DNA sequence: ACCGATTTGTTCGTATGTATA
DNA sequence: CTATACATACGAACAAATCGG
């Protein structure tokens, strides 16, 4: 069952918030909220939007990075897709 | 018998992991892995290195703090020795 | 060259829930 | 019931990088 990109975080459910957010973000990317090569919402923005701690948001993003869905650049943002070849 | 600074955690032995780690860290400090006034490995690093939960690592460090072997600063790290005089 | 704002990176502090011996 | 261990979450402070002016 695919995740609803408009779903809210359920703090009481069996699935942890960071996992829920990871799924939601993937659903939003799949839907086209953010396109390939473009930055997704900032961590601060996601904190406000989903009412989670920044550490939790970062953990969700870490999952996406792990899966190769996004990549991050310090001081810039988190981008959809993979780092360009040779991004030293 | 002194603890081997290169010892690994024995999860099945009679000594609890946090005690083992506390002894190992003391042995490593005594050996000179980390010098006076310098930070020891981060909690995250120790978690990875020893395969323990962060709470367990923190508990081991708490022992060292209690014994005056190290002191910690939030957001910075855990340092060998004691806090400088007048560290409010 | 500098400064301020924004954003990600790192680290420790604290608390809760679950599981196990 | 207690101690131990682990996973998770939120809070806070500071560092580092980026970018605009």
Image: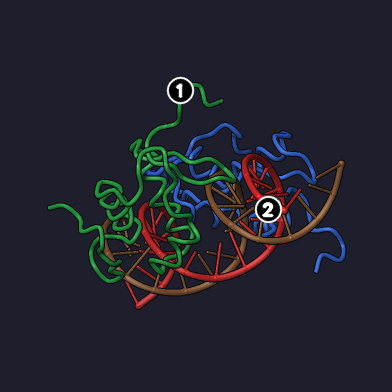
Chain colours: A green, B blue, C brown, D red
- Residue at image point 57% right, 31% down: B6
Measuring from the top left, give residue A27's x and y in whole percent. Answer: 25, 51
Which numbered marker is on residue B76?
2
Please tell me which residue lies in front, A30 or B83. Answer: A30
Task: Identify the mark at residue A85; answer none if there is no mark.
Answer: 1
Quadrant location of residue B1? Answer: top right
Q: Position of residue B49 (x, y in %)?
A: 51, 37
Q: Which x, y percent locates residue B48?
A: 48, 40
Image point (25%, 57%), residue name: A5
Subunit of mark 1? A
Residue D17 occupies quadrant: top right
A88 relative to A11 in the view: left or right: right
Q: Secondary structure at mark 1?
A: loop
Tags 2 and 1 touching, CB below 8 Å: no
Q: CA distance from mark 2 to mark 1?
A: 34 Å
Give the quarter of the image for residue C21.
Answer: bottom left
Q: Say if labels 2 and 1 share a chain.
A: no
């Amino acid at each position: 069952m695919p995740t609803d990109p408009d779903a809210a975080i359920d703090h009481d459910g069996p699935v942890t918030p960071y996992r829920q957010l990871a799924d939601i973000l993937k659903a939003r990317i799949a839907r086209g909220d953010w396109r390939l090569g473009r930055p997704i919402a900032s961590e601060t923005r996601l904190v406000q939007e989903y009412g989670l701690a920044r550490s939790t948001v970062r953990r969700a993003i870490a999952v996406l990075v792990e899966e190769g869905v996004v990549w991050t650049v310090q001081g810039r943002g988190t981008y959809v897709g993979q780092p360009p070849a040779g991004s030293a």
